[in-house]
């Protein structure tokens, strides 16, 4: 990949790599951690373009606001839910229990 988004995408991947097993972060939290406020959608674009890196990058640990699986109902959403459950992540009402599994305490960043 090359171009103006390369630096941003690489910063996103670096943050996602550091999310520990059994924890999740929202797209908005990742954006805030890489210094792009209101950049949640761009984080989604970065993760949507990971291609061959997908096997090594724990993309499944990034969820929508309030623990929502953004791709729910699609094959990749089912894979994401399965991988999170395999890591011990609990779901309440169809969403990740963010109080238990969220990476950042509530209020540290928007998500």
Image (spheres, rainbow, N blue to C red):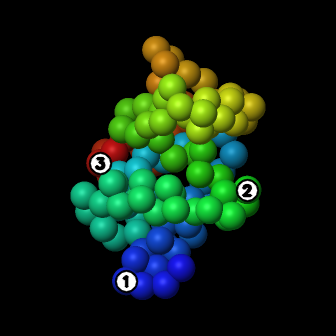
Give the Cα separation between the discs numbered 3 and 1: 25 Å
Give the Cα separation between the discs numbered 2 and 1: 25 Å
Give the mark nearest the N terminus, 2 or 1: 1
Q: Which residue is mark 3?
A: 110
Callout 2: SS: helix
Give the mark nearest the N terminus, 3 or 1: 1
Q: Around disc 1, counting alpha carbons within 10 Å, would you say few (fewer than 14), some (14 to 19), or many (20 or more)?
A: few
The reply to whether the C-beta atoms of the residues labelled 2 and 3 are less than 8 Å apart is: no
Closer to the camera: disc 3 or disc 1?
A: 1
Q: Residue furthest top?
A: 93
Give the Cα separation between the discs numbered 2 and 3: 28 Å
Q: Around disc 3, counting alpha carbons within 10 Å, would you say few (fewer than 14), some (14 to 19), or many (20 or more)?
A: some
**Residue toward you, 81 or 19:** 81
Residue at (60, 44) in percent of width and height: 60
Q: Quadrant for residue 57, please give it.
A: bottom right
Residue at (42, 85) in percent of width and height: 3
Say if residue 100 shows up in the picture. Answer: yes
- Image mark for residue 4: 1
The reply to whether the C-beta atoms of the residues labelled 2 and 1 are less than 8 Å apart is: no
Q: Which residue is mark 2?
A: 55
């Amino acid at each position: 990949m090359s171009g103006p988004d390369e630096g941003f995408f690489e910063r996103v991947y670096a943050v996602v790599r550091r999310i520990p097993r059994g924890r999740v972060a929202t797209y908005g939290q990742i954006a805030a951690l890489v210094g792009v406020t209101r950049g949640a959608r761009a984080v989604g674009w970065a993760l949507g373009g990971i291609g061959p890196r997908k096997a090594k990058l724990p993309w499944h640990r990034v969820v929508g606001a309030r623990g929502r699986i953004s791709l729910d109902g699609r094959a990749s959403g089912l894979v994401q839910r399965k991988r999170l459950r395999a890591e011990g992540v609990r779901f309440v009402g169809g969403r990740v229990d963010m109080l238990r599994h969220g990476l950042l305490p509530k209020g540290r960043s928007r998500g």
